[in-house]
Amino acid sequence: MMSLKWSMVVAAVVAVSAVSPERLSAQVPVDMQAVDSGLVVRAWTDAGQVRGRLLMQLSSDSDSVLYCRFPGPSCEREFIAAQTAWLQLGGVRHLDVQVGNRWKKGAVIGGVFGGVIAALAWGGPWFCEGTSCHRSTGEKVFQSVKSTVIMGALGALIGSAFPRFERRF
């Protein structure tokens, strides 16, 4: 009876991984969606990856688009010729647009890590003064929640440094 339950769990995990976003990416239409100027994009070309901030709108009738290399000095206040380049859309395999960062994922990972460490630390005899350890449940819960919140905040701070991209075409 127990093996049937585990086999159902394994089957569910296999089913979810078979329908992952990487496998569904072939379902995205190949026609280009308009991308506004000022957005940070990541273009995958035959030569490699190009990352920059668009200086003009990208639409389906565009042959090329002017962008400012990113990271680097900003091209918004003054036009810097050495920092800008033209991206020929004929050689672009796909284009991703930055839509935020990964602070939520970082907060979850940090919070889980902090909770596990706190549960191990405060649940055992490691922080006792002597042979007997009499801590109240409230104190253990408070220390665990405090550790979870602190590590979650640290994880959110670290996760905010990593951009999140969404495929446009």
Image (spheres, grey):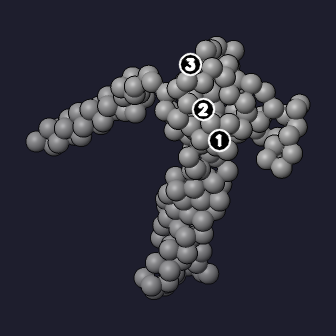
CA distance for labels 3 and 1: 20 Å
Q: How far apart are the two marked residues, 3 and 2, measured between alpha carbons?
A: 15 Å
In the image, taking residue 9 as reference, residue 91 lies left or right, namely right
Measuring from the top left, give residue 57's x and y in whole percent.
62, 36
Mark 2 and mark 3 in contact (Cβ < 8 Å)? no
Residue 47, horizontal then vertical, whole percent: 69, 15
- Circle 2 sits on which residue? 58
Q: Is residue 114 visible?
A: no
- Give the residue type at disc 2: Leu
Q: Residues within 10 Å of mark 1 (few under 14, many from 20)?
A: some
Tell me the kind of residue under disc 3. Arg
Q: Which residue is mark 1?
A: 37
Identify the element where label 2 is drawn. Answer: loop
**Residue matched to label 3:** 93
- N-terminal of the pair, mark 2 or mark 1, is 1
Marks 2/1 in contact by CB < 8 Å: the verdict is yes
Determine if residue 156 is in view: yes
The mark lying in front, picked from 3 and 1, is 1
Cβ–Cβ below 8 Å for labels 3 and 1? no
